[in-house]
Image (spheres, rainbow, N blue to C red):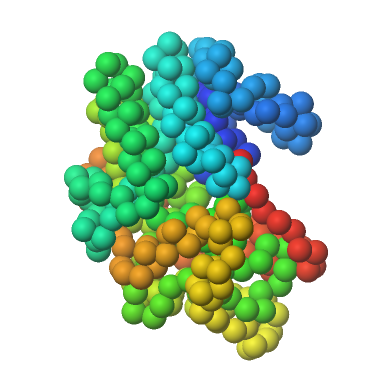
């Protein structure tokens, strides 16, 4: 395959960053991945060029981006800690590196930017009036990218629903619905019957981004697209798919679906950063939230889409919840 160029991945050990690194590599891109422990990552995954450095250090990011035509900004503070102190400086460093290298920035977008006034169907032009502290920070990240685009720093935002996938880390599927490394005996449902929710299968998200990147010359300097992903129209399709696949795997019909005990999260969230962030996003489970992908279809003609059953089965296998790897060892899935 012909080499497409150099791509710098910030957050290559995370869900979307890792999936993009793999798919871009398969398309002929040379992958540089910035990491605070590059030597250990190099030993674990020699496919990529691991570079020692920290996304919080502007000189590290600028150095790693030399010669890059693409920078994937998929890095987040570990464990949701210190978002208010770390997130904006990191996007500023990425913008500075892109300004110097001439690369386009890719930012996986979130629904956090929007408040209830934009629901139930969000388009690229919907007003961003975030409901949470985290949403306000994500809105500011995008504002800075839009401002940088006016000065010649190009960016691409692809917004999708809640991530899930075989190698996804910090997300509702692997931290709320099931327990990685353990057979599925019960499923915790954050939502409620009749309230729709939107999911996004990571390999489909990465495929969509790769197709858009291949059209770089025709994209706006500040380009934004929304994905439809998997629409759980009534709030039961995802948990029912998990239960159906788990029961097929075990031959049992005893997998239970339980409502998430939000009251318990509220009680202990002040002491557990991850639970505090989950509690803050509860509003996204209390009303239908969907993304409109008509703009994306107008550019690509279609949206990459893995059938739900196949996507859920691959995810449960990757999380070691089904198959011979589901041995009950309590594996914790995390991502930087």
Q: Residue at x 39, y 67 (%)?
A: 285
Question: What percent of the width, then of the height, locates residue 203?
Answer: 51, 49
Nearest the viewer among 129 and 20 is: 129
In which image quadrant can residue 64 be found?
A: top right
Residue 311 locus on image (x, y percent): 52, 61
| Res. 44 visible in picture | yes
Q: Can residue 292 be seen in this view?
A: no
Give the x, y percent position of residue 53: 64, 22
Above/below status of 36 relative to 83? above
In this image, 165 relative to 137: left or right? right
Residue at 52% over, 58% down: 276
Vertically, is 185 above or below 297? Answer: below
Which of the image's four quarters has the N terminus?
Answer: top right
Q: Check the picture and name the quadrant holding the C terminus.
A: top right
Q: Nearer the viewer, residue 209 or 285?
A: 285
294 left or right, relative to 113: left
Query: Whole-percent x and y of residue 275?
Result: 56, 60
Q: Is 229 or 275 nearer to us in this picture?
A: 275
Residue 296 falls in image quadrant = top left
Q: In this view, does 225 lie to the left or right of 307?
A: left
Q: Could you say which is closer to the camera, residue 27 or residue 205?
A: 205
Q: Which residue is drawn at 62% across and 83% down?
A: 255
Dividing the picture into quadrants, the one containing residue 143 is top left
Residue at (66% x, 74% y) in the render: 184
């Amino acid at each position: 395959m012909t080499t497409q160029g150099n791509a710098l991945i910030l957050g290559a050990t995370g869900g979307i960053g890792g999936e993009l690194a793999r798919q871009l590599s398969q398309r002929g891109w040379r992958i540089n991945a910035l990491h605070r422990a590059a030597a250990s990552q190099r030993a674990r995954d020699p496919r990529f060029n691991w570079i020692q450095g920290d996304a919080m250090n502007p000189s590290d990011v600028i150095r790693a981006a030399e010669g890059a035509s693409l920078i994937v900004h998929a890095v987040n503070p570990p464990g949701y800690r210190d978002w208010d102190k770390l997130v904006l400086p990191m996007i500023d460093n990425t913008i500075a590196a892109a300004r110097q290298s001439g690369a386009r920035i890719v930012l996986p977008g979130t629904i956090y930017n929007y408040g209830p006034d934009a629901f139930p169907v969000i388009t690229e032009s919907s007003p961003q009036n975030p409901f949470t502290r985290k949403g306000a920070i994500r809105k500011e990240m995008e504002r800075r990218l839009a401002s940088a685009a006016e000065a010649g720093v190009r960016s691409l935002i692809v917004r999708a629903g809640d991530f899930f996938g075989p190698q996804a880390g910090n997300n509702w599927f692997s931290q709320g619905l099931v327990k990685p490394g353990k057979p599925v005996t019960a499923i915790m449902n954050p939502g409620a019957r009749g309230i729709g929710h939107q999911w996004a299968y990571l390999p489909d998200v990465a495929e969509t981004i790769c197709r858009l990147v291949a059209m770089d010359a025709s994209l706006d300097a500040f380009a934004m697209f929304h994905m439809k992903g998997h629409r759980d129209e009534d709030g039961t399709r995802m948990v029912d798919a998990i239960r159906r696949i788990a029961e097929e795997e075990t031959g049992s019909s005893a997998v239970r679906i339980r409502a998430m005990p939000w009251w318990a999260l509220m009680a202990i969230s002040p002491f557990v950063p991850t639970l505090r962030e989950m509690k803050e996003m509860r509003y996204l489970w209390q009303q239908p939230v969907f993304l409109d992908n008509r703009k994306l279809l107008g550019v690509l003609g279609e949206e990459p889409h893995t059938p739900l059953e196949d996507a859920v089965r691959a995810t449960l296998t990757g999380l070691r919840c089904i198959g011979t790897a589901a041995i009950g060892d309590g594996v914790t899935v995390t991502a930087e």
